[in-house]
Image (cartoon, grey):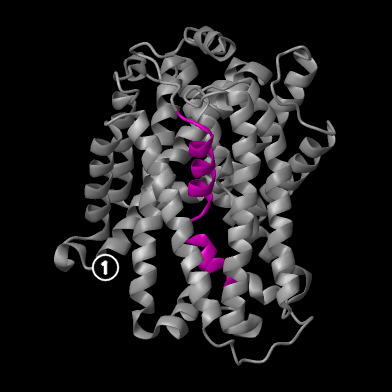
Amino acid sequence: MQEKGHLLRVLGLVFGFAVVIGSVVGQGILRTPGIVAEASGSTPVLLGLWVLGALVALVSAIPLAELGAAIPRAGGYFSYAARGLGENAGVLFAMTALTMGVTNQAQLIYVLGEFMFRFGVGGGDWSPGWLGTIAILGMCLYSALGTRINGASQIVLSALKGAFLIGLVVVFFAGPAGASPEAPGSGGGLLAFGIAMLVITGTYNGWGDLVFFGEEIRDPGRSIPRALFGGILAVAVLYLLINAAILYVLTPAGAAGSEFAAADAALKAFGPNGDFVLTLFGILSVGAISILALMINTRYAYAAARAGILPRVLSSVSERGSPNLAMLAVVAPTIAFVLTGSYITIAATTISLSEVVYLSICASYFALRKSEPDMERPWRAPWHPWPALIAALIHLALLAWFIWSDPVNSILGMALVGAMMLGYLLLANGKSNLAELSHVTKDIA
């Protein structure tokens, strides 16, 4: 793995923690407390919902931890699907994740452009789309510096985000408590609780991104499970502190219905400077996630090219461990989506697909437990099969919710991936590149 042309195994456990925390913690935690507060007027109940969300994330991480430790490949999800469910399934989920990754990256850099615009970057002469485009081009130059530098930067950026949020917690608790009346036990009923849990689950999303660095993490059999569970627990503590601080300043009654609860709390704590503080955090947070998303998408494209799904030339790696051609391959459509605005429509079609991808993880887990019971598993999921089964049922319910709430885009997303898969099979003459996918996923370092 240290040879030229291969990814470098130079990242450690601390980087793993940084990826989990960095992928999960973003602007969502500053906006969602207001939606969640509509479920109940009791602070302990609301904090209990966030604890429940952490438990859902921990249970969901169990099958992925086993797969990530046993099959530490840059392809992540599609490597598991190819080995457990067959090569066609691997290609299908590779295309699904590539589509989701590019549109998610487009959303991130556009939002980053919006924060930069609000901060006054460009003096108001540049649109958020162009500001975001300039930012991602700068990220490309930085990413080309190599794996070690990028890994170190993620540790620093995740630490800065955590420190910033803890600083907000301290400032919020240092001020006066909210004066609006609470009504313990009140709320919007079962529907409000259901919406709250849906929002909370989404706010915890992102922890699975760690597995895309499986070929670059030292001792992945131990480091990946530790980073997954440790990172989720760290995020849970941070989320509880933030929510407790916001509810202290606003109270549940004051937070309920707020579109940006943290901004309302910051306005009380910082006065007119509250917007400046949160805009600064927005640039830091979304910028950090954008860099991390670029690293993840690059490795996904690299793995797909190595497997023959994308042109093989994209599987080249620099001496510093950066797949630069794969990076350019994902950045080009990302910029096109941002500047045309088409990412908004496509991103809406991928929400339900994210649940389909997670269900493929559970299916791969069960399939490999049956077909390869003697496969070396450095970390084995405890209490098999119950955690994976519970996780699958949870995400099946989420998929049903997304399809019910947005059937047009859900069906359109699945049709889009199906059309891509059909086109691939036609161009590849059915099997010409699929054998390479099997070889790559079973050749575990």
Query: Could you classify mark 1 by the number of other residues whose Cα lies within 10 Å: few (under 14), some (14-19), or many (20 or more)?
Result: some
Residue sitting at 33 percent across and 56 percent down? 112
Q: Is residue 21 magenta?
A: yes
In the picture, the quarter occupied by the N terminus is top left
Location of residue 178 (image quadrant): bottom right
Q: Where is residue 322 in the image (x, y as percent from the top left)?
A: 33, 26
Q: Is mark 1 on a helix, strand or loop?
A: loop
Residue sitting at 51 percent across and 64 percent down? 166
Please indicate whether residue 90 sits to the left or right of residue 291 in the image.
Answer: right
Q: Does the magenta stretch include residue 15?
A: yes
For disc 1, the marked residue is: 119
Location of residue 272 (image quadrant): bottom left
Q: Where is residue 247 in the image (x, y as percent from the top left)?
A: 61, 77
Rendered view: 289 above or below 237? above
Please indicate whether residue 46 sits to the left or right of residue 282 in the image.
Answer: right
Rendered view: 430 above or below 99? above
In the picture, the quarter occupied by the C terminus is top right
Q: Is the magenta stretch mostly helix, strand or loop?
A: helix
Location of residue 186 (image quadrant): bottom right
Q: Position of residue 34 (x, y in %)?
A: 58, 74
Q: Where is residue 93 in the image (x, y as percent from the top left)?
A: 56, 29
Asked if residue 111 shows in the view, the reply is: no
- The amino acid beneath tag 1 is Phe
Asked if residue 276 shows in the view, the reply is: yes
Q: How many labels does the image show?
A: 1
Residue sitting at 51 percent across and 30 percent down? 212
Instruction: Specify start and end residues of the magenta stretch as a single range.
Output: 11-34
